[in-house]
Image: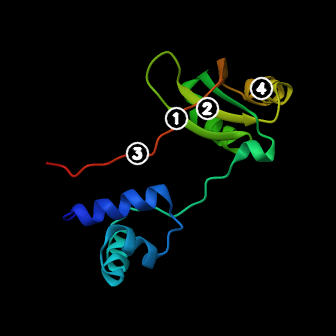
Amino acid sequence: MGKIDDTDMRILAELIKNSSLSVPKLSKKIDVNASVVYSRIKRLLKRRLIKRFTVMVNEELLGYLVTAIIGLNMDAKLRDSILEELLRFDEVRGISEVTGRFDLIVEVKARSLDELHDTISGKIGRINGVTHTETFIEMKKKEKEPHYTLPK
């Protein structure tokens, strides 16, 4: 992938905090010339170390007050169709194939417990090949920005 140095890491750290930071402001923050910062960002994008710049929506302000993590077991022969069906639901935020007692972990957002119930019972539970679900309702969540270090 090529050399990643301290300047690249400082750029990444600042962009993780705020991806809308302009190049001039970013260059002042890390005390590196703006043209250097611009070329470094282009290089990080080209190397796919930066996948994309995006927005994090405050879903609570849109009324999505309930987050649930659903452990799901399925008929492995129907894996692809189950994944496709899950991805069609607006409530589904992410799917992870995992090891352990579940085959999939599905993150779901809902506006209420009733809406969550409808999503699990009326949608997810009715997918052909879903054999079992177990739901964990998120009560509080602490998030932190990742901190990366250079490999030694």
Q: Residues within 10 Å of mark 3 (few under 14, many from 20)?
A: few
Left/right of residue 117 with respect to residue 68 in the rendered view = right
Observer-nearest of 19 and 4: 19
Which mark is drawn over residue 106?
Answer: 2
The answer for how far apart the CA atoms under marks 4 and 3 are is 37 Å
- Marks 1 and 2, how far apart at CA: 7 Å
Crowd tier of the residue under label 4, counting other residues whose Cα lies within 10 Å: few below 14, some 14–19, many 20 or above: few
State the SS at label 3: loop
Upstream in sequence: badge 1 or badge 2: 1
Q: Quadrant of residue 49?
A: bottom left
Task: Tell me the SS state at disc 4.
Answer: helix
Earlier along the polypeptide chain: callout 2 or callout 3?
A: 2
Mark sitting earlier along the chain (4/3):
4
Q: Residue at x 81, y 25 (%)?
A: 113
Please name which of the two marks, 2 or 4, marks the residue nearer to the observer.
Answer: 2
User: x and y percent of residue 152 in the render?
Assistant: 13, 48
From this view, report whether residue 120 is shown above or below residue 53.
above
Secondary structure beneath dot 2 equals strand
Q: Which mark is residue 96?
A: 1
Q: Secondary structure at mark 1?
A: strand
In the displayed structure, does residue 51 sit left or right of residue 69?
A: left
The first of marks 1 and 4 along the sequence is 1
